[in-house]
Amino acid sequence: MSADHPSISRFRAEHARRGGAGEIVILPDAVHTAALAAEALGCEVGAIANSLLFDADGSPVLVLTSGAHRVDTGKTAASVGVAKLRRASPEFVREHTGQVIGGVSPIGHPAPVPTYLDAWLQRYDVVWAAAGHPAAVFSTTYDELLRLTGASPLDVE
């Protein structure tokens, strides 16, 4: 897999524009789950920041959650002030992020998306997140993710 994939190139440019300091890594295979990403990177599954896009009555909401967690959509919807969060369709994800499920990065979307960051991720010195493609990831920290995304901290479980 070449780093020349357009979604990775767009991510690299946005990461640099926002002053991202982490390393961008292109893995030999796609890692569509936190467990696969953790295995490929040799880290705990909890240190993987899953980018989960939800549909809140037609508006996107991005939740960056630890790979060790399942988002409680009822609790999270109430916390972010929407009636309901439902799993977004692949088309909805692509429309609002420009990326595919399994490769959605926390940044670099066509338009700003309200973003929330699982406070649990503070426990890790290094956090890994998707870099715009299912085979691309980048290293970061909880504090840098807050800065890069403008996210609000949230307890998602």
Image: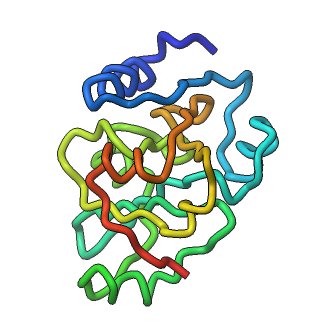
Q: Residue at x 46, y 44 (%)?
A: 104
Residue at 41% x, 74% y: name it: 154
Location of the N terminus (image quadrant):
top right
The residue at 25%/61% (across/down) is 114
The number of numbered discs placed on residues in the rendered structure image is 0
Query: Which quadrant: the C terminus?
Result: bottom right
Q: Is residue 135 left or right of residue 101?
A: right
Can you give x and y, in whole percent of width and height, for residue 56 in the image?
A: 29, 74
Residue 106 % position (x, y): 40, 46
Where is residue 55? Give x, y as percent: 33, 68
**In the figure, 97 relative to 17: above or below?**
below
Tell me where residue 18 sits by quadrant. Answer: top left
Q: Residue at (61%, 44%) from the top-left corner? A: 126
Residue lying farthest left? 111
Q: Nearer the viewer, residue 119 or 77?
A: 119
In the image, taking residue 18 as reference, residue 142 lies left or right, namely right
Q: Considering depth in this image, is 47 or 92 the residue closer to the camera?
A: 47
Query: At which x and y percent is residue 21?
Result: 44, 28
Applied colour scheme: rainbow
| Horizontal relation, residue 82 to residue 5: left or right | left
Q: Taking 32 as reference, is 119 above or below it?
A: below
